Amino acid sequence: MILIWKKKGILGILYLIFFFFIVLLISETLSERVGGIFATSYNRMWLYGITCILSGIATIYTDIYTIENKKIVRDDYQFNEIFYLPMKLFGKLILIFGILNVIAGILEG
């Protein structure tokens, strides 16, 4: 798979990877250490959904805000792309996919 990005576009994929490991690490730690309801077998679709929701929100905010002179500034005219899609659209698609995964995980579980 070829990654095609412009400016901060690579952060969309990096957010997916980062939040995937964080959510999975928290989930496994809770099931190992806490037990109880976390130790039962459950559908993992909602974990992937939470990962996509978090990375979608982070992607959208990364495209809207930028850091200039050590201050966070809103910049609506940035042009960041990933896979020839604007980052805001890519973030919204990931967010919708995450919400659908959470709904599917709840309905199946």
Image: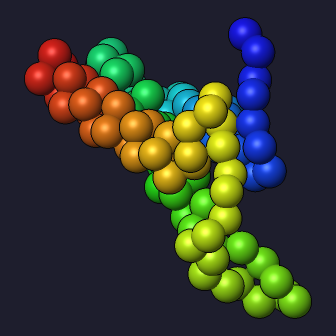
Q: Is residue 105 above or below residue 86?
A: above
Q: In this view, does 90 lie to the left or right of 81?
A: left
Q: Quadrant of the N terminus?
A: top right
Quadrant of residue 58 within the rendered picture? bottom right
Depth check, front residue: 40 or 82: 82
Q: Position of residue 10 (x, y in %)?
A: 75, 40
Farthest left residue?
Answer: 107
Which residue is at a point 82% across and 83% down the rendered structure image? 68
Which residue is at a point 16% across and 16% down the rendered structure image? 108
Q: Position of residue 40 (x, y in %)?
A: 32, 21
Q: In which quarter of the image is the C terminus?
A: top left
Which residue is at a point 62% across and 70% down the rendered structure image? 77
Q: Position of residue 43 (x, y in %)?
A: 30, 18
Farthest right residue?
Answer: 69
Depth check, front residue: 51 or 92: 92
Q: In this view, does 24 lie to the left or right of 13?
A: left
